[in-house]
Each structure stands twice: as C-alpha cells, then as structure tokens.
Amino acid sequence: MIQIQNTIQQKIQVHLEFPVCFTQDLFTHDNATFEQCVCNKEPDKQHKVIFFVDDSVSRKHPTLLKDIQAYCQDRDSIDLVTKPIVIPGGEPAKNDISFVENIQQMIEKFKICRHSFVAVIGGGAVLDMVGFACATPHRGVRLIRIPTTVLSQNDAAMGVKNAVNAFNKKNFLGTFCAPYAVINDREFLKTLCFRDWISGISEAIKVALIKDAEFFAFLKEHAIQLRERDIEAMEKLIFRCAELHLQHIRCSGDPFELGYSRPLDFGHWAAHKLESLSGYRIRHGEAVAAGIAIDSYYAYRQQMLSEQQLHDIHQLLSSLQFSLYYSQMHHSDFLNGLEEFREHLGGILCITLPKNIGHKIEVNTIDNAIMYEAIDYLKENFGESVT
C-alpha cells in the first residue's frame, strides 16, 4: 500500500458581517437606509443595482415600483440599471428552476458584477430563490434582502443560506451565501393577508421554546393582540425572533451546518414533509406550527415536557388559529420525512426537542409508535384542517 508522504493541512477562517436594519417607508425621499446599506463600504462610488419584486407585493403596494425608481433617480450613488422587475412569488417560485435561470439571465444582461447589487423584495420563498440565483454568477453577487412577510422578517431573511425545491424535496438545491444587508420595513406587514400575518409567528414560538422562556411568556401574554394584528406587538416579536436567530447563527460555531445538529429546525422534519405532501398548499409557517405540535407531544411522552407545558404550547398555537392536524399526517409516506431529514442533515438523524420551556435536547432515534400516537392525539383533540 502506498503511504501518504506529505500533507499540507489548510485552515481558513471566514469573517462575515452584515447589518439587519429596521425601518419604515423605506423608499421615501428622506429615508437613507437603503442608500447607506449600498454605500457603507464604498461611499465614493456609484453602485449598479437591479431590483426584483415579488408580484404579490407589487400588487398590494401599487406605487412601490415608481417609488423605487424615484428614490434611485434622486441619488447619484445609485445606478438603477433597469426598472424593477416583477417576478412570481410564493412557494411556486422555488419549484421551477427556470425562475432561477431568468434571474441569472438578467444579471448577465445588465452586467451585474461581484461588486454590484441585487435587491430582492418579497416573502421568504422569493428571497430564497433569488438568493440561490445570485450565489452562482461570478461565484456570488451582492444581495440585499428586503423581506415583506412576518416569516421572512423574523427568520428566512436572517440566515446565510438559500435554496430551491427539487425532486419533490424541500430545499434540495441550495448554497451558503450571506446577504450584504437585510432591511425590514414594517409597512409591508400592514397589507398581509391573515394567513401570512399569522404564519410567521410559528417561527417565533419555535425559537422561544428552545432558547427563551421569557419570550415564550411574551407570546402567550400577547397572543390575542398578535392575532388581531397589533403592529407594535408584532414588531417586538419580529425583533426578538430575528435577534435569537442571528445570535444562534453567530455563536453556534457551525453557521454553515457542517455538523448534524440543526436546533433552528425544531419541528421542521414534519413541516417539510407536510408542505411537500400538500403540494405546498400548506404554507411553511403553518406546517412549522403543526411540526411543533407533533414534536412537543413526543417530548411530553419522553418526559421532557410536563402536561401543563404541553397544554400551554398547544393552546398558544390554537389561540393563533393554527391548524395542528392535517390529513397528510396519516399519509403512508409522512414518517419518511424523518429519513429525508436524516439525509438532509448529513446521514445522522438529529432531532431537536424542547426540554422544559426555553431549553432543548437533541435525540438521534425516534420511536415511530409514539409519533403515530402524537398524530392521533392531534386529530382527536384539534380536528382536521381542510387545507
């Protein structure tokens, strides 16, 4: 056998830094937030920018495209290379690779280089798709995310990864590529439909259950206000949820997910499978809520949660009008979501569960019989959704 004679061991440390800004009326003349994000590293240069806008956002904000154009025209530092381009939104944007190719074609057509900017305005799916498209031309162009939904402002836009769906699997194709900046504008929240307003709250419940008991208490205390669209309560929720997600990414020691642990994916093995089995009619946040309900029951049966804690979790989800049971949970392929999640993690199953409120534990095996019991419990106690 030939032995290795020489080895050069390489070690590279990557430094990533980006701002997450909270503002209102982003594209009004007096709001300098976007310009500051573009110019912060090269203030004396004119920067090329191209905008992609979620079609549902452009419909709900009919002056948005003109506002963007006027904003950029008033600033010598910004070279808007073309009118904002409207693209399909929602989960279908992640299901068709041609959308990715169209973004890449626009990047090439308008000569967007590595030091130029793509700005994307929309929900989490559009941010994911455009982020994936931007990660490949020139091995990555600068991306500014402007999320418009609760879920994207408190979770999806915060991370350093992006993906699209393929082979009937959620987020099968993706990259790690940090944004240049994230800008949250509260005005976009005001036109959300009820489902999109509520849907993103599940990600806040998720992170509260495994990281912050005080935050979970806040969510319980303000559940009615949140359900009734209290913007002040929602702003507090979004800020704390985003803060906890960013803190985990920054401090976990594994921002690029080289290991097997995914604490922020608590409830997500079931969520991803529910989305797929429903043909993505179930929104991601809705599926996460159901996933939390299942895994919390499992944690209760494993004596990680008390009966009262389980009740509090399910009561909070129900009070926000989340469906905790879907017929897809009894699909013969549903528990195969665990195997698909194992593959996604890198070959070893690692499921995060709450241990009391505000703490977590990770398990490497799952008792399917208890999972089926959890599903039956949710059907019996919370009924069946028609989604």
Image (cartoon, rainbow, N blue to C red):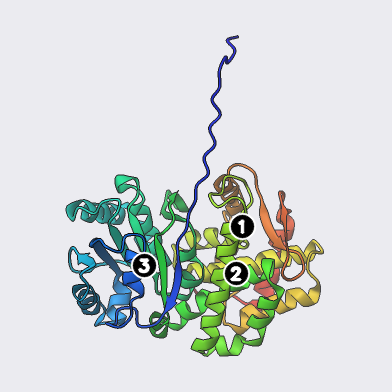
Which of the two discs, 2 and 1, labels the residue nearer the N terminus?
A: 1
User: Which circle, 2 or 1, is nearer the viewer?
Assistant: 1
Q: Local crowd at mark 1 within 10 Å, few (<14), some, or many (≥20)? A: few
Along the line of sight, the residue nearer the viewer: 4 or 132: 4
Question: Does residue 174 sit above or below 120 in this rendering?
Answer: above
Name the residue beneath numbered marker 1: 251
Q: Position of residue 38 (x, y in %)?
A: 32, 65
Name the residue beneath numbered marker 2: 290
Q: Secondary structure at mark 1?
A: helix
Q: CA distance from mark 3 to mark 2?
A: 37 Å
Residue 37 numbered tag: 3
| Residue ID at (79%, 61%) | 302
Q: Is residue 166 left or right of residue 376?
A: left
Q: Position of residue 203 (x, y in %)?
A: 56, 70
| Residue ID at (18%, 56%) | 110
Can residue 331 be spotted in the picture? no
Residues at circles 3 and 2 in contact by the CB criterion of under 8 Å: no
Along the line of sight, the residue nearer the viewer: 238 or 335: 238
Q: Local crowd at mark 2 within 10 Å, few (<14), some, or many (≥20)? A: many
Amino acid type indicated by mark 2: Ala
Question: Does residue 129 sit above or below 293 in this rendering?
Answer: above
User: Which circle, 3 or 1, is nearer the viewer?
Assistant: 3
Amino acid type indicated by mark 3: Cys
Q: Residue furthest top?
A: 1
Which of the two discs, 3 and 1, labels the residue nearer the N terminus?
A: 3
For the N terminus, give its image quadrant. top right
| Residue ID at (60%, 47%) | 342
Q: Position of residue 362 (x, y in %)?
A: 71, 55
Q: CA distance from mark 2 to mark 1?
A: 28 Å
Residues at circles 2 and 1 in contact by the CB criterion of under 8 Å: no
Q: Secondary structure at mark 2?
A: helix
Q: Residue furthest front?
A: 44
